[in-house]
Amino acid sequence: GQSNMDIYVYLNEACTGIENIDEAITLLEQNNWDLVAAINGVIPQENGILQSEYGGETLQGPAYGPTSHPTASSSTPSSSSAFRHVVPSRQIVERQPRMLDFRVEYRDRNVDVVLEDSCTVGEIKHILENELQIPVSKMLLKGWKTGDIDDSTVLKTLHLPKNNSLYVLTPDLPPPSSSNSGALQESLNQNFMLIITHREVQREYNLNFSGSSTIQEVKRNVYDLTSIPVRHQLWEGWPPSATDDSMTLAASGLTYPCHRLTVGRRSSPAQTREQSEEQCTDVHMVSDSDGDDFEDATEFGVDDGEMFGMASSALRKSPMMPENAENEGDALLQFTAEFSSRYGDCHPVYFIGSLEAAFQEAFYGKARDRKLLAIYLHHDESVLTNVFCSQMLCAESLVSYLSQNFITWAWDMTKEANRARFLTMCTRHFGSVVAQTIRTQKTDQFPLFLIIMGKRSSNEVLNVIQGNTTVDELMMRLMAAMEIFSAQQQEDIKDEDEREARENVKREQDEAYRISLEADRAKREAQEREQAEQFRLEQIRKEQEEEREAIRLSLEQSLPPEPKKESTESVSKLRIRTPSGEFFERRFLASSKLQVVFDFVASKGYPWEEFKLLGTFPRRDVTQLDPDKSLLEVKLYPQETLFLEAKE
């Protein structure tokens, strides 16, 4: 609007004399869109102050004469310009070096250093060497907000704000005796695991940072992952002590070893401004001492994508997809985040993963769960892209239909490296004909929508839809592809059901056969065990019988000879009845010991350990008598009838 042009005229002619809009914008970007810092970077601050129209507020800048600029006549008190238009003196003002203030923290000390921006980083280190008594070779100067800095780096090339905070690390020097300093040094050497949740896409990142990393470095890494610029990041979870982005993680109060954070995109002031605020056409220039977080062109009523009448693509900082991304999943994650940032959250759910993984998800499940694969090919330089994305891909009816029936995968064809990478994938999966078809598409024919159907041996491209279409036509072509797919899917379901039925019958037969084999084997094993047991018992029985027979024969051979009837010695005649009712008789010398009778009975197969020998009159257990006494002594003379009885 007129406000933006007034500011541009003011910056170009009234302050700096810069007539090239690209040069002016570059200067603003170098100063984080801080207009005052940009002016002071070109014109020395000592020349005067710049008057604002707000209640006596002064902004540092050059002083000029009261003569009005030729264009000021068209400006009234209600003009949207923030400043009075003044004409600079027609004198040539040489650019003076900027003075930069540095506060350097080392352990429990702070050192203030003031240098011209024409000095180098090494000169700061030499000053610190004298102040801190630390050799330059042992000193690591940290806290810079940009990378790739060495001792020869000129401060002017870093585009630093006037006030800066740095800190010194000395990992090669022993820590001081203080326990607090030792704990801080130990924390600087520790690794912190930050679990960062991206609120808009519900994606979680696990990032490792050393304790010497700064909060600013964390935010820059998150920008690389989420495409949310640092100035637009809205954080939750930082400790209350983390008040400065230049602070190290070790000193910020994070929970060790793991800390959870949440990041989202900050709404632009134009979107969050309450309608009840007093209408004001003046534009406030906002700047803090660090020169950070200037609110871009949105603070002037201009969207992020447009500045001073320039096309949105001219200032777009984040591509849809990084060039030469190693991981397709990470590339698709950035694509989804950037698509949501540009066109809103109502869009197709893009599959996060490689093209092969999308094939697996769409084509290789059960027939009832299979879907068509829709490949969206984006191109930022096509005139159809914005309309196609905002009016068609973000239409609720199309989003719902794609979600129910398709797996949607996307790729950005804007960068040549990404285009060549997709054509290689296309040749591998769909053949050279399809790849050639896409290769010959002109830029203004993009975006493209490829509808892919999986078949048993190949993947078939059903349709290639160009960007010059309508929502109704796009929906009709998607539905036509679904009809073809549904017919094929029904055949696949029928074949799959028949195959599963055959497999179930075979599985049941195999199971029955297995059970039968198990039963036969168990029966056979039981029989074998029984036979083995019988054999074992038979062996034991035989051994016992053999042992008993050997004992019997031994006893039989050891018996004294039976006395003859006509013997002149006293003879005792014993008649013994067995448990089976049989009788056997034998003559013994009356002087023979009772043990001889026991041995005789045992030689007949009745060992006295198992049988007892009982007398009749009186009834007594002869086996309980002393075996060393003679028959005469135990009154088994001249004759006696005994009977055998098994012991219990």
Image (cartoon, rainbow, N blue to C red):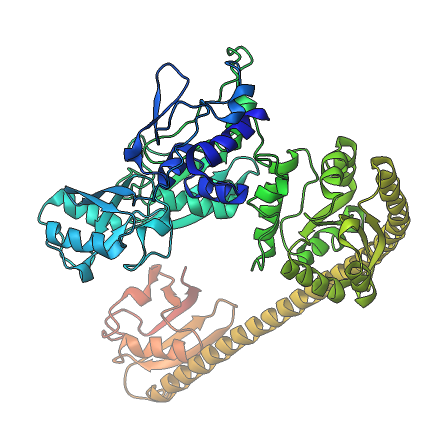
**Looking at the picture, how far across and down is residue 131, in whole percent?**
11, 49
Q: Name the residue nearer the viewer: 476 or 274.
A: 274
**Residue sitting nearer the eye, 632 or 315:** 315
**Image quadrant for the C terminus?**
bottom left
Residue 80: tell me if it is visible.
Answer: no
Q: Position of residue 293 (x, y in %)?
A: 42, 34
- Residue 3 appears left or right of 107: right
Position of residue 2 relative to residue 196, above or below, is above
Q: Residue 482 lies in what quarter of the image?
A: top right
* Residue ranking furthest to the left: 177
Answer with the quarter of the image where residue 251 lies.
top left
Q: Is residue 228 left or right of residue 568?
A: right
At horizontal 37% and vertical 64% (from top left) the residue drawn is 614
In this rendering, position of residue 108 left or right of residue 395: left
Residue 324 is left or right of residue 587, and the answer is right
* Residue 521 vs residue 229, the one in the foreground: 229
Q: Residue at x 33, y 62 (%)?
A: 621
The answer to which quarter of the image holds residue 627 is bottom left
Query: In the rendered view, would you say 554 is above or below 496?
Result: below
Q: In which quadrant of the rendered image does the N terminus lie?
A: top right
Q: Say above or below: 136 vs 558.
A: above
Residue 203 in picture, x, y percent from top left: 54, 42
Q: Nearer the viewer, residue 90 or 463?
A: 90
Residue 572 in the image: x percent, y percent?
33, 78
Q: In the rendered image, is residue 141 in sight?
A: yes
What residue is rendered at 24% in x and 69% in y? Answer: 626
Relative to 73, residue 484 above or below: below
Tell me how many marks there are: 0
